[in-house]
Amino acid sequence: MSDGITGLAGVVVWTSHERFQAMRRFYLETIGLPVRSDRADFVSFQWGTPPRDVRLTISVHARVQGAAGDPLRIMVNLGVDDIHAVAARLVASGVDFSRPPEEEPWGGWIATFHDPDGNVVQLLQPTG
């Protein structure tokens, strides 16, 4: 067993009780992320299998109110194989991209949009 950090286990995006259902619907229905657990005031998405799985969780925190006060503080990057196909599907579902898919100088592709709380979300298609 290693005594060091072995990877990213997950990210939690906190929201208010009043905004939770909009956030849940966005990540679950609009984006279509793979659900691990779905309960009142908590939804978790998972990729991979333990112990190397990664989770994105949307949950209610009593001290969080309203939209994100500083939406650039954190950015959720979602990996994709075909950024143009995923972006087109999301646009058809009503997602408004602030930056449509474009190639980066390092060779990968990104596209940027916001979730219902105003958090920055980005599609990321790395180079082969």
Image (tube, rainbow, N blue to C red):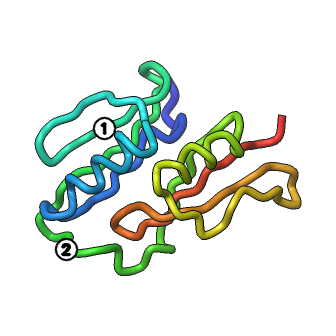
Q: Say above or below: 122 vs 125.
A: below
Q: How crowded is mark 1: few (under 14 residues within 10 Å), some or many (20 or more)?
A: many
Estimate the x, y position of residue 41 in percent, counting from the top left: 15, 48
- Provide the secondary structure element on which disc 2 rests: loop
Estimate the x, y position of residue 37 in percent, counting from the top left: 25, 30
- Provide the secondary structure element on which disc 1 rests: strand
Rounded to the nearest angstrom, the CA distance separating label 1 from label 2 is: 20 Å
Label 1 vs 2, first from the N-terminus: 1
Q: Look at label 2 and name its amino acid.
A: Gln
**Which residue appears at 61% of the width and 42% of the height?**
86
Q: Look at label 1 and name its amino acid.
A: Ser
- Please indicate whether residue 61 sits to the left or right of residue 121 in the image: left
Total marks shown come to 2
Q: Say above or below: 63 vs 30.
A: below
**Which residue appears at 44% of the width and 74% of the height?**
71
Asked which quadrant contains residue 113, the reply is bottom right
Q: Residues within 10 Å of mark 2 (few under 14, many from 20)?
A: some
